[in-house]
Amino acid sequence: MDKYQEQPHLLDHHLEWMMNSLLDIVRDNGSPPPLAHLAFKFLYIITKVRGYKLFLPLFPHEVGDLQPVLDMLVDQNPKDSETWETRYMLLLWLSMICLIPFDLARFDGNIISEEGHARMPTMDRILKIAKCYLVVSDKARDAAAVLVSKFIVRPDVRQKRMADFLDWTLSMLSKSSFQTMEGTVVMNGMLQALAQLFKHGKREDCLPYAATVLECLDNCKLSQSNQMVLRKLGMKLVQRLGLTFVKPKVAKWRYQRGCRSLAANLQAQGSVVQNQIITVPANEADDEEEYDIPAEIENVVEQLLVGLKDKDTIVRWSAAKGIGRISGRLPKELADDVIGSLLDCFSFQETDNAWHGGCLALAELGRRGLLLPSRISDVVPVILKALTYDEKRGACSVGSNVRDAACYVCWAFARAYDPAELIPFINQISSALVIAAIFDRDVNCRRAASVSCYIPVYGTFPHGIEILTAADYFAVGNRVNCYLTISVYVAGFPEYTQPMIDHLVNMKINHWDSVIRELSTKALHNLTPRAPEYMANVVLPRLLPLSVGTDLHTRHGAILACAEITHALCKLAEENNRYKLAEGSDLKKNFLSFLILLILSTVIIKYDLIKYIHFIVLPLLQESAVSALTALCNEYYINEKGEADPALQGELVTQYVSELQNTEEMIRCGFSRALGALPRFLLKGRLQQVLEGLKKVTLISPADVSFAESRRDALIAIAKVCQTVGVKGDGSEEEYVCKDNITQIYATLFTAVTDYTTDSRGDVGGWVREAAMTSLMEVTLLLVQNEAELINANICKQIMCWLAQQSAEKIDKFRAHAGSVFLTLLHFDHPPVPHIPHREELERIFPRSEKETLNWNAASEAFPRITQLLGLPTYQYYVLLGLSVSVGGLTETTVRKYSAQSLFDYMKKIQNDSSAMESFCETLLKVFEDNLRNDRVSVPLLTMLDQMLANGCFDIFTMQENHPFSVKLFTLCKEEIKRSKDIRKLRSSIGVFCGLIQFQGDMREKVLFQLFLLLCHPFPVIRKTTASQVYEMLITYSDVVDPAIMDEVMTILSDTNWEAELPVVREKRNCLCDLMKVPKPQLVSKSCISLFYSCSI
């Protein structure tokens, strides 16, 4: 049913048959209680979606239904939390049955029961049930309040029980406290019952009790409660009491529009349609004022006005509706006094809650025609302020609800008043609404303002149709589009240009949100062509003092605005000299004043640039600062010949290069990026100095091992410098990328590809590797497009091999980047990159058609392709190095799963190819040997070897005695774990040793000896793991042990507590050595830290 929540009316045609079907189950005496409860539960779900008010009349309400429903309610347990839906629906059903037009005394008959005891009358039974459920904490309480409102107002019940019931409710209210949970529950039920009763009861029946109820309500002091529901119910009851005190007459003095025809409104194009105003005869108006207004009304109105300032929206909305309803029954003078008091909410001493509540109340009054045209002049200024209400509160601001409610007021006024009444204010309102629809920070306010613009369009709203077409409900959903596109279109209408600019300058460039400030200044840039004179004469002089003010937000926005407006004016002047300054004009004077200020600023920057360059180190400003540096150098550091001043150039470059060794990482980053942004004329003659300085930044030393970001920025700068100076093979190494420095550049980049630095942030070396791969691509493509002969075969081989290794590693982001660079170089055609090893095979594995579609982030797609490179001798070593880290990863991930599966699939393909197997194993041992004691590679490599041995990847060698592969692998494993305390490494080595047991010859004895050494390792967890894996090994390879001793060996392995003291464990281990005829390890040395065993085999 939830899918009907948005449009529940679609259920209306089906409600009756659904209800009847479910009630048939309930009425069937043979239905078990769980089934009946399920039926009521379904009824509740339907009621929740459609609402009980519409659902209620569909309940059967015949005389014969009364007794069964009462009996079912009596059988219910009010404390059963599982069946509250049943009780809720039964109470609603009973409230409908109570409307039967018969005296309830007729249902009592002989009230003497068969046992001789007096039976409770039906009236009292219903009342008892209602009272019982008014004090429960579940949803049944709401239904009980509905039951009371229908039952107490019956003529027979009203005469006999109404006074007693009200006494009971007031007594319960007086005795309860909202400071306790029980008291809150009781007060909730009583307030709901009273509110419903005074809503549905006749005024003459309720009036005698209204003053008493109001007094009791005042004594409860609900406004001090923290319970929002209680305050809302209190406000609802107050307005119901107020409506009881005054006669239910419609105010004859209210404003009424006599014509609501759309055709009539459109009959005169371009003119305002004059609607007829209904007039009331004087004698009728006089009759309206003849009755007295009770004194209690003042108290009611006061409470409602206070409720408009409540902290919760739902309470303020209830108070606003109460103000509207009661004002409609008051005389004109008193209603005007209420409006006067209401306008006091719009003071800047009041909170945003008061402003919001006041807007809601004004909308209600306007919608009901209770706000007369004479008051519009007082209300419009308030609404205009509310449309831009935004109060700073801590790190953010409040007021979006106020602006939204102000849009609702405009919507209500446009529907309520004749267009002629709004003509004096239409320009102000339309400008404010358009500004809110375009420049408000919150999307709900922009959309509310856009919708509010629809109503007053015809005949009054300037350019309404055009604006609404551009700024409709959906278009204003994108804030950037509003500020930068829609605003320019709307500013094309003269009525809105200046108000929009003023709003941005006054309200938005000093906004607390930096995004709004930046968008506002960009909008001012775009709006400058619409009003250049106004920008230069008025806006810029207003902004200049703000740019040196004390408020940081205002200063930031003003500086950005000055820059954007000046830039726009400059562009405007350059466009065919369209924008000319008249001699002696104010525009020229103000513009020249601003230019003088800029020139003075640039003079300071020009001569003190080195002194103030430390501003570049701020991370958030680096990008903007570097961009500004490039523009500044191109403007002020070049002479007429296109060259730099040698002295200034030397000082600048030397200072920048020297700062690359600063002890602050961010300073290194800033100056690296600054060197990368220098124009060619400043790098000319200083290229080698710059490259050497950047190279030093990329080197890792103990003092700056964690400076990954500076190394990254230096690598990016190297590529940018190369692109800036260009390529000339036989040129000078001080001016061009040439044959003399290309080797140095590539060596720096190749070194960076091996950066695997880690710290508390994780694999920070990945940032360096990513930048190195990008720079390798950019430099290589630069050479290919200019002088490809500078790229020799060895360089190209290293590039492709390093990229292949990175493409096989485990981190998705870096693998994807490496794969993308790899394919870019492989398929580059303008011209092709020379000397790529195995180009034809690579193009077969990675077709050009899949260059863009291959998802390197998906391990399931990447690894089946990359493992095919294992068959290419040039790439085999590097791909295997990358796969070792992926296959032997620490945790079970999709990367580990697919990389391992791809490797095993490749091994199956070459099982019958002895030369391929020999080559693979030789490469594998080479990877192990080169990375011995390098835990980043060796630990996952041991895990990968364990998996490969377990999957039978080397079965082809197991039948040969003392195969060189197994001997070398055993030696490397021993060397890797020698004196190691790494638990993970030791555990992985145990698996490798157990896997090597399948090789024939002397290998088995060596393996068993090594495993028995580990059975007495100082770490108990290693001893336990070894025993467990040896046990599994002997089960898998049963030929290792003589069957005669197998049971005894297995018993010792399984029953011994290998975490016990070493002397106990050693005795068991030696017993195993004797049984399996393996030499006993000898104790060589012992320290307080660890035991080391050694033995020459």
Image (tube, rainbow, N blue to C red):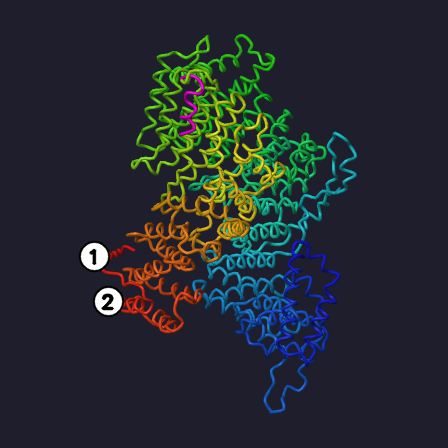
Furthest toward the bottom, the residue is 115
Residue under numbered circle 1: 1085
Q: Is residue 798 above or below residue 998?
A: above
Q: Hey, which quadrant is residue 296 in on the image?
A: bottom right
Taking 195 as reference, is 1061 left or right? Answer: left
Taking 659 as reference, is 407 left or right? Answer: right
> Which quarter of the image is occupied by the N terminus?
bottom right
In the rendered structure, find residue 996 and report the number of the disc placed on it: none
Task: Give the percent coordinates (x, y) of residue 64.
Answer: 72, 78
> Which quarter of the image is occupied by the C terminus?
bottom left
Label 1: element kind = strand
Q: Is residue 223 above or below residue 873?
A: below
Residue under numbered circle 2: 1063
Is disc 2 surrounded by few (<14), some (14 to 19) or many (20+) residues within 10 Å?
Answer: few
Task: Give the percent coordinates (x, y) of residue 702.
Answer: 29, 37
The reply to whether residue 1021 is in sight is no
Label 1 to label 2: alpha-carbon separation: 15 Å
Label 2: element kind = helix
* Residue displayed at 40% across by 17% down: 734
Q: Is residue 1038 magenta?
A: no
Foreground residue, 363 or 1077?
1077
Give the residue type at disc 1. Answer: Ser
**Which tag, 1 or 2, sits closer to the chain's start?**
2
Give the residue type at disc 2. Answer: Pro
Q: Hey, which quadrant is residue 60 in on the image?
A: bottom right
Task: Give the percent coordinates (x, y) of residue 574.
Answer: 57, 14
Q: Hey, which quadrant is residue 358 in on the image?
A: top right
Task: Give the percent coordinates (x, y) of residue 7.
Answer: 68, 54
Foreground residue, 1092 or 319?
1092
Instruction: Give the extent of the magenta segment.
Output: 734-747
Q: Is residue 116 above or below residue 1011?
A: below
